[in-house]
């Protein structure tokens, strides 16, 4: 390039004073032009009239005249052929270099608003675009020229590489920031690198753009407010689809890994350099053809238990005289409610009716006993008060006491469930070719305790009034309990988590099967190519339709030549199958319910004999039994296990002529504790296997 090149001072040509055009009055050199000038273009460079005139747009000495010239004639003194064409200097890459109808072009690099004179300094430029990666640019300086550009002035500053064209808008080939440089000490060889700020472009994405990418689930990934940046969220969503995200001119574009049905460009034999085509199969160690999803689902199983209790005092009217009346209904109800269970369906039978009953005691013969469950009081009128009258009250005790009674106790609780759902996603054809290559994906679906399900569980556990379990949505089990699931299944939490996890597994398998890379070099520079495209290749060695994975542009600024290298990634599968997203219903594990819960529903009559040793709780009794060496010396009747007495508890007070008298102590209802098998965490497991399809990019290789 002629521009900005200083000419040296050696003689170019010497002309004697004699002239073919006109006589001159002196002898010597007419014109001394230093250095041999190599001009690439035809035409007149300059015309000298009378005096020497040189019009040129560039700095530097073009011509040196040894002395002043006096001409005694009118006309041209000298004519030097060639002229400078500014158009060709601005667009040194001819149209034959570029692909399609891109046309002739020049190159301009603008850094922080300042144009860098690349013709003076740079030798070559390489720009690389690769799917899911930041694009880069590498600029190599001419030897011993790079030091003229102040590196630190441009470091971390935005830069742009433009392709300028006549009568067309500039084409932006690359935008990024100067990032690093390499110096070769000694020869002052310098390489500059630039990188597109991909990480920052993530942060510029809108919520609508992010939500349009793949799918997301808080159980598979994390909650939205737990992400520190948008990049992490976008990458999580990308892991659910076989596609790449690339920024074209700063705009996010999601492109499927599957080739488009209609190619963006068709490349034939004239468009591809035969010697630079290569096809490579990547290491098969990276193949994944089986992913086991271990989905741990934590939820609650709601229980409803009902137990019936029956009490019969066995008292006759005669026992009323020795032990008093049987327990009052209020006493029995209070004892039942004291269990913490909900009492319902209470019914009882009252005292014996009034009459004369024959009773035997004190060793004598039966004697009549008059019994009347009614009693009353009489208050005579005050004789000094004319308005006063006799006052009589009668109380019927018949239904205040319970000869016998029955009742129902019910309670509700929630049992934690850890359900392991194992879903295996696999491709049998790949397993047959490569053997089994397994990966594991662990997911935990937690019960969301702040939604309607949480309120449902709390209402279930805060049970204080009897409710029909069937109307509450519970189902009776074989062990007598009613159960209801509270696991968000109706709201789709488990289904959504499984669907998203399945897509992540399928994407992993598909990614590993993009195991063929084919690289072709175009015969011409193709700045129009990018990684979102599909190319239809048809030349003597390769035929097929393939997705672009990498584009490398190389520009030789010295020889004014450029080319583009394109790499395609292909699916390789034993069978050419079709991939599509298919949701599956989560397999559910069978409940491991406790088989045979038992309880004692008989409320009996328990008597504390005189001088008996009473044990209020089991620990006291066991400690005492240990002290006795496991063989208590006291007779069975002389110890009373109070904590086991379920029903009426009475105590003997004295004996009169062989008849024992006593009194009621307490009425106790013991609701046996629910067995641990129904309260502690239940672990259950379900397994299933699903088959997925892997496409095969049909590639015809011709040797």
Image: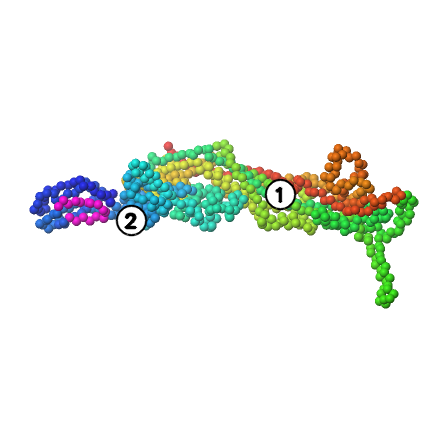
Q: Is residue 307 left or right of residue 247?
A: right
Q: Nearer the viewer, residue 4 or 170?
A: 4
The residues colored magenta run: 52-67
In this rendering, which labeled residue sits more in front, label 1 or label 2?
1
Quadrant of the rendering where the C terminus is positioned? top left
Residue 416 is labelled as 1
Q: Secondary structure at mark 1?
A: strand
Q: Which residue is mark 2?
A: 166
Residue placed furthest toward the front: 627
Neighbours of disc 2 within 10 Å: few (<14), some (14-19), many (20+) = few
311 versus 186 height, above or below: below
Quadrant of the rendering where the N terminus is positioned? top left
Q: Give percent across and percent down for residue 447.
A: 58, 45
Residue 248 is labelled as none
Q: Nearer the viewer, residue 117 or 678?
A: 117
The reply to whether callout 1 and callout 2 are in contact (CB within 8 Å) is no
* Cα–Cα span, label 1 and label 2: 75 Å
Q: Give percent across and percent down for residue 490.
A: 59, 47
Residue 319 seen from this side: no
On whether residue 639 falls in the magenta region, the answer is: no
Q: Nearer the viewer, residue 247 or 651?
A: 651
Q: Is residue 239 left or right of residue 519?
A: right
């Amino acid at each position: 390039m002629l521009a900005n090149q200083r000419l040296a001072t050696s003689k170019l040509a010497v002309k004697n004073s004699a002239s073919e055009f006109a006589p001159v009055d002196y002898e010597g050199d007419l014109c001394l032009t230093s250095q041999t000038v190599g001009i690439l273009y035809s035409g007149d460079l300059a015309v000298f009239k009378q005096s020497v005139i040189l019009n040129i747009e560039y700095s530097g000495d073009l011509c040196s005249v040894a002395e002043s010239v006096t001409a005694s004639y009118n006309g041209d003194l000298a004519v030097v052929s060639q002229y400078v064409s500014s158009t060709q200097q601005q667009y040194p890459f001819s149209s034959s270099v570029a692909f399609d109808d891109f046309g002739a072009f020049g190159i301009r690099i603008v850094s922080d608003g300042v144009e860098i004179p690349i013709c003076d300094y740079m030798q070559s430029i390489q720009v690389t675009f690769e799917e899911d990666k930041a694009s880069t640019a590498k600029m190599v300086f001419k030897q011993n020229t790079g030091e003229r550009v102040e590196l630190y002035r441009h470091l971390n500053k935005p830069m742009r590489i433009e392709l300028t064209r006549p009568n067309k808008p500039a084409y932006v080939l690359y935008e990024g920031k100067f990032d690093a440089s390499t110096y070769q000490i000694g020869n002052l060889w310098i390489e500059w690198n630039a990188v597109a700020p991909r990480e920052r472009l993530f942060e510029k994405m809108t919520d609508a753009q992010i939500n349009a990418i793949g799918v997301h689930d808080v159980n598979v990934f994390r909650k939205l407010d737990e992400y520190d940046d948008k990049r992490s969220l976008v990458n999580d969503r990308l892991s659910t689809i076989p596609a790449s995200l690339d920024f074209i001119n700063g705009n996010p574009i999601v492109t499927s890994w599957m080739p488009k049905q209609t190619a963006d460009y068709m490349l034939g034999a004239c468009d591809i350099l035969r010697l630079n085509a290569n096809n490579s199969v990547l290491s098969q160690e990276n193949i994944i053809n089986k992913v086991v999803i271990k989905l741990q689902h934590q939820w609650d199983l709601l229980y409803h238990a009902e137990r019936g209790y029956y009490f019969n005092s066995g008292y006759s009217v005669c026992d009323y005289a020795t032990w008093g009346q049987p327990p009052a209904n209020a006493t029995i109800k209070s004892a039942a409610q004291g269990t913490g269970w909900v009492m319902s369906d209470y019914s009882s039978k009252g005292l014996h009716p009034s009459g004369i009953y024959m009773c035997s005691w004190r060793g004598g013969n039966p004697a009549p006993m008059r019994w009347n469950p009614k009693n009353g009081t009489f208050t005579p009128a005050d004789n000094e008060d004319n308005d006063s009258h006799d006052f009589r009250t009668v109380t019927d005790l018949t239904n205040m006491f319970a000869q016998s009674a029955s009742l129902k106790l019910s309670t509700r609780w929630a049992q934690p469930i850890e359900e392991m759902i194992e879903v295996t996603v696999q491709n049998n054809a790949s397993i047959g070719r490569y053997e089994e290559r397994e990966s594991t994906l662990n997911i935990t679906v937690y019960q969301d305790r702040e939604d309607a399900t949480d309120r449902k569980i709390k209402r279930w556990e805060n049970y204080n009034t009897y409710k029909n379990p069937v109307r509450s949505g519970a189902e009776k089990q074989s062990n007598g309990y009613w159960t209801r699931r509270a696991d968000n299944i109706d709201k789709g939490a488990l289904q959504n988590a499984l669907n998203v996890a399945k897509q992540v597994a399928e994407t992993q398998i598909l990614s590993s099967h993009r195991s063929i890379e084919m690289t072709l070099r175009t015969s011409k520079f193709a700045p129009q190519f990018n990684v979102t495209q599909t190319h239809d290749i048809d030349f003597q060695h390769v035929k097929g339709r393939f997705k672009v994975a990498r584009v490398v542009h190389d520009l030789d600024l010295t020889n004014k030549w450029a080319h583009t290298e394109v790499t395609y990634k292909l699916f390789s599968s034993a069978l050419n199958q079709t991939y599509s997203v298919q949701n599956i219903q989560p397999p559910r594990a069978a409940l491991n319910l406790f088989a045979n819960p038992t309880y004692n529903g008989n409320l009996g009559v328990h008597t504390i004999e005189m001088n008996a040793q009473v044990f209020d709780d089991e620990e006291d009794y066991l400690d005492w039994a240990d002290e006795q060496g496991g063989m208590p010396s006291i007779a069975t009747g002389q110890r009373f296990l109070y904590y086991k007495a379920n029903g009426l508890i009475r105590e003997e007070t004295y004996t009169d002529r062989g008849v024992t008298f006593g009194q009621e102590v307490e009425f106790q209802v013991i609701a046996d504790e629910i067995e641990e098998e129904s309260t502690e965490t239940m672990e259950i497991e379900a397994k299933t296997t699903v088959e997925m399809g892997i496409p095969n990019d049909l590639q015809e290789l011709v040797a």
